[in-house]
């Protein structure tokens, strides 16, 4: 696996646009699995360190520090929750009867998602499924807050800007599932049988027996970080462009997105 594109670099910082499917650190159970930090260390040495984490299935901006001074300065910002994080997500707005049963789905009067909403719900590990997180009521879970803005609506799909104020595992994914609008192609918290197919969007398009989704992986992308630079203390905005498959999905949603709701189907490939 090749090193992902570097989207920003100076004497203190290095930021990559990580593809979906790439681990950022060695796997807990299989240390031999290829991961981004192993590639970074092989290319740039062990003086470069990551300052945050990103799920393997999530694409986008991944920030590293090139020296200890920068690492300490940046880590302090993440720990104090002063970093602004923006993600892009394509969500599937489920009908209420199919939404997560933990909370009432968030809905606008027309049945879609509101322009702005906040999910403030405790999260913690699911004791019944390794690697999965779940909602906790009361004081049992860790505080987890995400602000959402609905940027575009396409029938039963929506493009959201997600701004996590805390940094829990799978936070955006669980919060959107609890809002009744899981991230498209989320096998843990969504409906794995719903796919974004051109035949579901374009009227009269019958598709093929082996039709493939417009985007086949978790539709979540870490798009932007706003941090204070360790050398100057001034705010700096780092960004990672949307991957090609994400752009293709949005292209067809924008062109044909008033079509019928997504159907439950099994798709080859």
Image (cartoon, helix red, strand yellow):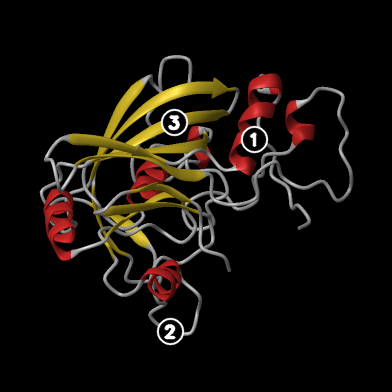
Q: Secondary structure at mark 3?
A: strand
Is residue 112 visible in the rendered structure shown here?
no
Q: Is residue 161 visible?
A: yes
- For discs 2 and 3, the disc positioned in front in the rendered view: 2
| Residue annotated with mark 3 | 160
Percent position of residue 103, x then y: 33, 41
Instruction: Check disc 1 and report the residue beneath it.
Output: 249
- Looking at the image, which residue is at 39% across and 31% down? 161
The x, y position of residue 200, in whole percent, is: 74, 32
Residue at the extreme front of the image, as rendered: 11
Distance CA(mark 2)–CA(mark 3)? 35 Å
Q: Are marks 2 and 3 in contact (CB under 8 Å)?
A: no
Task: Kindly check if marks 3 and 1 are in contact, taking CB atoms under 8 A apart as contact.
Answer: no
Q: Earlier in the sequence, mark 2 or mark 1?
A: 2
Label for residue 31? 2
Q: Residue furthest top?
A: 109
**Mark 3 and mark 1: Cα distance apart in space:** 14 Å
Would you identify the image quadrant in which residue 244 lies? top right
Q: Position of residue 165 (x, y in %)?
A: 22, 41
SS of the residue under disc 1 = helix
Mark 3 vs 1, N-terminal side: 3
Q: Secondary structure at mark 2?
A: loop
Which class describes the residues within 10 Å of circle 2: few (<14), some (14-19), or many (20+)? few
On residue 41, the disc is none
Instruction: Work out whether 244 lies above or below 255.
Output: below
**Disc nearest the viewer among 2 and 1:** 2
Q: Quadrant of the N terminus?
A: bottom right
Query: Who's the residue at 87% across and 24% down the image?
Result: 204
Q: Dot 3, crowdedness within 10 Å: few (<14), some or many (≥20)? A: many
């Amino acid at each position: 696996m090749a090193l992902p594109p570097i989207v920003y670099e100076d004497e203190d910082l290095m930021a990559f646009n990580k593809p979906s499917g790439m681990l950022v650190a060695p796997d807990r159970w299989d240390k031999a699995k290829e991961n981004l930090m192993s590639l970074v260390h092989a290319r740039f040495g062990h003086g470069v360190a990551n300052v945050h984490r990103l799920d393997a299935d999530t694409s986008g901006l991944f920030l590293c520090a090139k020296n200890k001074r920068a690492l300490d300065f940046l880590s302090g910002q993440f720990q104090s929750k002063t970093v602004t994080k923006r993600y892009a997500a394509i969500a599937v707005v489920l009908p209420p009867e199919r939404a997560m049963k933990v909370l009432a789905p968030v809905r606008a009067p027309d049945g879609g998602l509101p322009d702005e909403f906040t999910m403030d719900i405790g999260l913690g590990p699911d004791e019944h499924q390794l690697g999965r997180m779940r909602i906790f009521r009361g004081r049992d879970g860790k505080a987890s807050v995400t602000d959402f803005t609905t940027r575009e609506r396409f029938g039963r799909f929506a493009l959201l800007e997600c701004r996590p104020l805390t940094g829990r595992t799978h936070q955006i994914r669980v919060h959107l599932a609890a809002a009744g609008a899981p991230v498209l192609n989320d096998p843990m918290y969504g409906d794995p049988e719903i796919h974004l197919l051109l035949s579901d969007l374009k009227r009269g398009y019958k598709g093929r027996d082996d039709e493939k989704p417009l985007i086949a992986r978790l539709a979540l992308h870490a798009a932007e970080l706003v941090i204070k630079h360790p050398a100057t203390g001034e705010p700096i905005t780092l960004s990672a462009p949307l991957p090609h498959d994400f752009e293709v999905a949005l292209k067809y949603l924008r062109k044909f997105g008033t079509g019928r709701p997504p159907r439950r189907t099994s798709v080859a490939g």
